Structures are given as C-alpha cells and as structure tokens.
Amino acid sequence: MVAIHEKIVAQLEQRKLKKRDLARALSVSPQTATDICKGRSAITLPHLRNLVNYFGLRADFWLDDQRLMPEASDRVGATPAADTPPSDALTRSGLAKIVDPARFVQRMRAIVGEHKREFTQRNPDLHESERQVLGLPENGTLHSQN
C-alpha cells in the first residue's frame, strides 16, 4: 500500500524540488511540510487541492494507494477515459466555468512568460499541446503575444 506522503516525496525527488517548495505550495510552514513528507502530519482536503494544483496530478492519483508514480492519464487535463465525456472533465477541473477562455489563456501565457524558466523546470513533462496553449514551443522560446 502506497501512502500519499510517499507519492509526495517521489514527486519532489523526480522534479528536483525541495520541501520548502512544497511548504509554499501547500501554504504551510517548512516544519509542517517536513512532517507531511515523513507521514507524521495528515493531508487535509485543502492540502489535497493544493497538491493537485501544484503537481498537476488529479486527486484520483493521490488517493490511489496502489501506485507510487503517475501515468499520463493522471495529469490534470489529460484525456479522460473513453467513458468520461469531455464536458465532465472540464466541469471537474473548473474550466467549464471560465466566461472568457481566450482572456484566461492570455493571462496564463503572461504568467508563464514571466516565470518561464521556473515553470518549465517544475513541469518538464509538458505535452506539446500544453506547451502550445501556454505559448511555449518545443525549443522553449515564447511566442510573441501580438
């Protein structure tokens, strides 16, 4: 049985992140982040939400006690299973509630552009379609925003 704290440690190691990065992502103290990584502190629902947002891995992955490492389908926004309509995935992610998707994407591109190096280091496994939406072509340079 794989515990959530083991998955967290594996993700930190794989992405070359530190516990202080986790502390910031979960909005907890560095000591609490250490306690979470050692399994001494429980994962709360807000922690789970922040884990999903920070690592880009669906809640289902974090709660699955059979696998340590994620699969492509565990990524937030990954193509859902054949029996899950796309509209359900958009609703679950909150993207269906966005009133002006073009404006949202433009703002996301601006944020990613300002923090491109950190973003690409934390997310080395971006799919080509994700890179295109974020304005990050394969060579890592930003498209112009004109």
Image: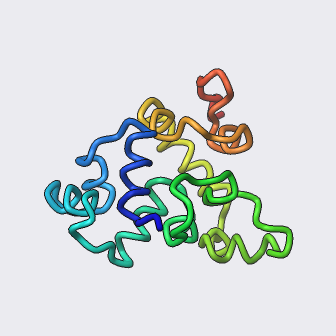
Instruction: Please name the residue shown 33% across and 56% down the image.
Output: 25
Judge by depth and name the residue closer to the eye, 110 or 128. Answer: 128
**Left or right of 34, for residue 6:** right
Quadrant occupied by the C terminus: top right
Tell me which corner region of the image, top left, top right, bottom left or bottom right, holds residue 73: bottom right
Which residue is depicted at the point 62% across and 42% down? Answer: 134
Given the current orientation, which residue lies at the most extreme front position? Answer: 1
Q: Is residue 34 left or right of residue 143?
A: left
Nearer to the camera, 75 or 10: 10
Query: Is 40 placed above or below 144 here?
Result: below
Relative image position of residue 78 (x, y in whole percent): 70, 57
Q: Position of residue 94 (x, y in %)?
A: 60, 72
Percent across and percent down for residue 32 are: 18, 62
Q: Where residue 85 sits: x, y (%)? A: 82, 75
Q: What sort of colour scheme is used for the picture?
A: rainbow
Vertical arrangement, residue 107 with respect to residue 41, above or below? above
Residue 27 in which image quadrant? bottom left
* Residue drawn at x 64%, y 36% as measured from the top left: 135
**In the image, what residue occupies the spot 28% across and 42% down?**
18
Q: How many numbered callouts? A: 0
